[in-house]
Image: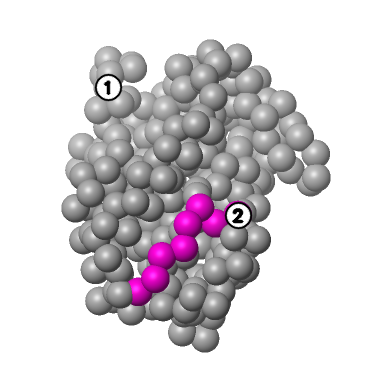
Amino acid sequence: MLKAFVVDDEAPARDELIYLLKKTGQVELAGEAGSVKEALAKLKETEADIVFVDMMLTNEHGIDLVKEISRYPQHPAVVFATAYDEYAVKAFELNAADYILKPFEEKRVAQTVAKVKKMLEGDRPAVPKNPGKLAVTTDERIVIIPVEKLLYAESVDGRTVIATDDKKYTITESLVNVEKKLPSTSIARVHRAYLVNLDGIVEIRPWFHSTYNLIMRDGAKIPVSRTYKHVLKQFIRI
């Protein structure tokens, strides 16, 4: 299933496109927004395969959004969904996957979904076994962090702060992308805003409403939400 994010300042237009996307049976909604600012904030915390964006938003331009998300290390495919056909050339200069016009037609939307799905499947290489290291870009350099030194990662104001035994790194990459880079390791999500290294926990303290606080080996206190409590129980058997 493709995870789609829809950006349009008109709610009826968003609803119509979301309905047609879901009707294909190949798409699930990752989120929606009515402005560039709202979209950028949500996309940093959302895993999306494809973004459908209107060209003209209220006092904003969809192209500005596309330029921003194209800077992400792993950015979603983009489809412009708009009433303005004169921007088609500009859209493809920005490597848009497709360009569909309002009013939306069910058959045309289905064709776009099929096209993007085929494109993404062809671009996905075999995923190698995780080497036990995390590469992050900070201060215009790439830092390699061994997983055993990583204590936790926290989402702060749209950025991610990675804490190690001896240093903290602030990166523009989302917490979702950091999590995707660390499969089959001791790193687990315990809260919407936190990943932790289960091997770095030195104490578990019960908290309100059947939740917990984790005390890491550097003394940091990390909350465990009820949503992710089962993850902690599975790994540590509490």
As for residue 233 lying within the magenta part, the answer is no
Q: Which residue is drawn at 60% across and 38% down?
A: 162
Could you say whether the residue bearing mark 1 is in a helix, strand or loop? Answer: helix
Mark 2 burial class by Cα count in 10 Å: few <14, some 14-19, many 20+: few
Q: Is residue 108 left or right of residue 63?
A: left
Residue 95, image x and y in percent? 60, 54
Q: Does residue 223 appear in this view? A: no
In the image, residue 76 above or below residue 92: above
Please state if 107 lies on the left or on the right of 73 as rendered.
left
Q: What residue would you read off at disc 2?
A: 95
Q: Is residue 211 above or below residue 88?
A: above
Left or right of residue 134, residue 60 in this image: left
On the image, which quarter does residue 89 sit in? bottom right
Task: State yes or no: residue 96 in magenta.
Answer: yes
Instruction: Tell me: residue 226, above or below residue 214.
Output: below
Q: Identify the magenta region.
A: 95-102
Picture coordinates of residue 210, whole percent (x, y): 21, 37
Considering only order in the chain, which callout, 2 or 1, is on the residue closer to the N terminus? Answer: 2
Helix, strand or loop for disc 2? loop
Query: Which residue: 21% across, 44% down?
Result: 25
Q: How far apart are marks 1 and 2 (CA)?
A: 44 Å
Q: Which mark is drawn over residue 52?
A: none
Residue type at tag 1:
Lys
Q: Mark 1 points at which residue?
A: 233
Amino acid type, callout 2: Asn
